[in-house]
């Protein structure tokens, strides 16, 4: 059975200038992360813009990533979609291609909250042999109540929690002692999430500086919380700059510093204005971007 822990980039999806998925660059990104020795990959989530892609695009992205990985590291595929039948199609393909697990956001369009659990239960049941990691944080939704309602699902083996409430994360992480994995999904609090019981980290900034999160994990495992927090603060200086200037556009612009032309994000995400790139790169250099990328 796959060991779900460690640091997993929430892989972004590169596009061409014509706004088509750039599969050549996608394969290069996978190779970059393999060389960085990441623990696994999480694809087609919010960072990967799965919600802004057609089912056909998502199927091809999954196929491309799985073929390029070729069994070397585990891959979790986000399959959540507005249409349950499309989500099931994505889940079954992920299973067929050998994904380690599937994930899903809370349904993006919810008219009646009572429908959330039946939606997630039906999705999980479509691939009963595949570990299921639904998001438990969904704005006004009570995460702990949702956790208890999902508990009877046999292949519900954990979650990606991207809330800021570390007390709540700690309760979720301690919910089961076996066959249970909680990923910390808020990059800015990854070290704290690990201290409160998270088993691993999934995040956007791992696209360009995955190693710093690996160092956080190593530090905590060695009992050195101060060092883990130091790495967190260093990473947060970079993250804060991107948040101030427009995170999604900055993240894609930053990838060009690594040699990856990943294109612009899809609407409603917004690109960074070209004339702002020099300012971004200067601020990133001051924040130690190159050193963090090199870890």
Image (tube, rainbow, N blue to C red):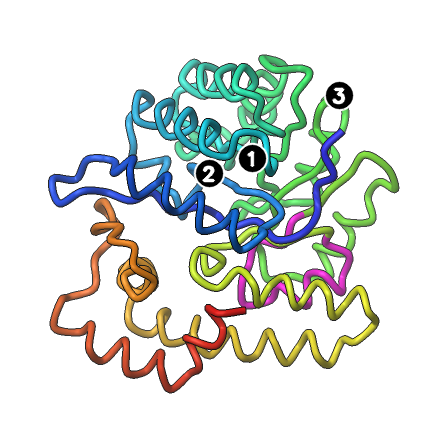
Q: Taking 97 as reference, is 83 left or right?
A: left
Which is closer to the viewer, label 3 or label 1? 1
Q: Above or below — where is 206 with respect to 110?
A: below
Instruction: Tell me the quadrant of the picture where the C terminus can be found.
Output: bottom right
Q: Position of residue 83 (x, y in %)?
A: 39, 20
Which is closer to the viewer, label 3 or label 2? 2
Label located before the other in sequence (3 or 2): 2
Label located before the other in sequence (3 or 1): 1
- At horizontal 28% and vertical 72% (from top left) the residue drawn is 245
Q: Could you say which is closer to the camera, residue 11 or residue 121?
A: 11
Q: Could you say which is closer to the camera, residue 207 or residue 239?
A: 207
Q: Which residue is mark 2?
A: 43
Q: Could you say which is closer to the camera, residue 276 or residue 63?
A: 63
Query: In this view, which residue lies farthest toward the right?
Result: 177
Q: Give residue 146's mark.
A: none
Q: Which residue is mark 3?
A: 154
Instruction: Report the magenta residues as a range.
Output: 183-198
Label located before the other in sequence (1 or 2): 2
10 Å neighbourhood of mark 3: few (<14), some, or many (≥20)?
some
Q: Quadrant of residue 232?
A: bottom right
Q: Position of residue 130 (x, y in %)?
A: 65, 21
Badge 3 marks a residue whose secondary structure is loop
Q: Taking 208 as reference, is 121 left or right?
A: right
Q: Which residue is mark 1?
A: 75
10 Å neighbourhood of mark 1: few (<14), some, or many (≥20)?
many
Whether residues under marks 3 and 1 lie with C-beta atoms below 8 angstroms apart, the answer is: no
Q: Taking 218 as reference, is 28 left or right?
A: left
Whether residues under marks 1 and 2 lie with C-beta atoms below 8 angstroms apart, the answer is: yes
């Amino acid at each position: 059975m796959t060991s779900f822990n460690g640091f997993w980039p929430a892989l972004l999806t590169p596009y061409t200038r014509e706004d088509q998925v750039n599969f050549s660059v996608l394969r290069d990104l996978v190779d970059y992360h393999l060389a960085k020795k990441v623990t696994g990959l999480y694809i087609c989530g919010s960072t990967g813009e799965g919600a802004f892609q057609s089912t056909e695009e998502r199927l091809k992205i999954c196929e491309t990533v799985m073929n390029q990985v070729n069994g070397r590291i585990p891959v979790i595929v986000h399959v959540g979609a507005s249409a349950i039948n499309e989500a099931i199609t994505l889940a079954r393909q992920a299973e067929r291609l050998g994904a380690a697990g599937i994930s899903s956001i809370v349904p993006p369009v919810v008219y009646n909250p009572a429908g959330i659990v039946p939606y997630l239960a039906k999705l999980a049941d479509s691939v009963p042999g595949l570990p299921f990691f639904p998001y438990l944080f969904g704005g006004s939704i009570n995460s702990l109540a949702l956790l208890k309602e999902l508990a009877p699902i046999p292949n519900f083996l954990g979650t990606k929690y991207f809330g800021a409430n570390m007390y709540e994360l700690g309760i979720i992480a301690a919910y089961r002692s076996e066959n249970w994995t909680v990923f910390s999904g808020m990059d800015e609090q990854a070290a704290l999430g690990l201290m409160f019981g998270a088993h691993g980290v999934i995040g956007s900034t791992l696209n360009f500086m995955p190693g710093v999160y690996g160092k956080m994990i190593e530090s905590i495992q060695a009992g050195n919380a101060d060092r883990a927090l130091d790495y967190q603060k260093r990473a947060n200086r970079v993250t804060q700059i991107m948040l101030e200037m427009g995170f999604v556009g900055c993240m894609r612009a930053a990838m060009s510093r690594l040699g990856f032309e990943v294109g612009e994000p899809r609407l409603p995400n917004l690109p960074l204005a070209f004339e702002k790139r020099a300012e971004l790169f200067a601020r990133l250099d001051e924040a130690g971007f190159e050193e963090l990328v090199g870890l």
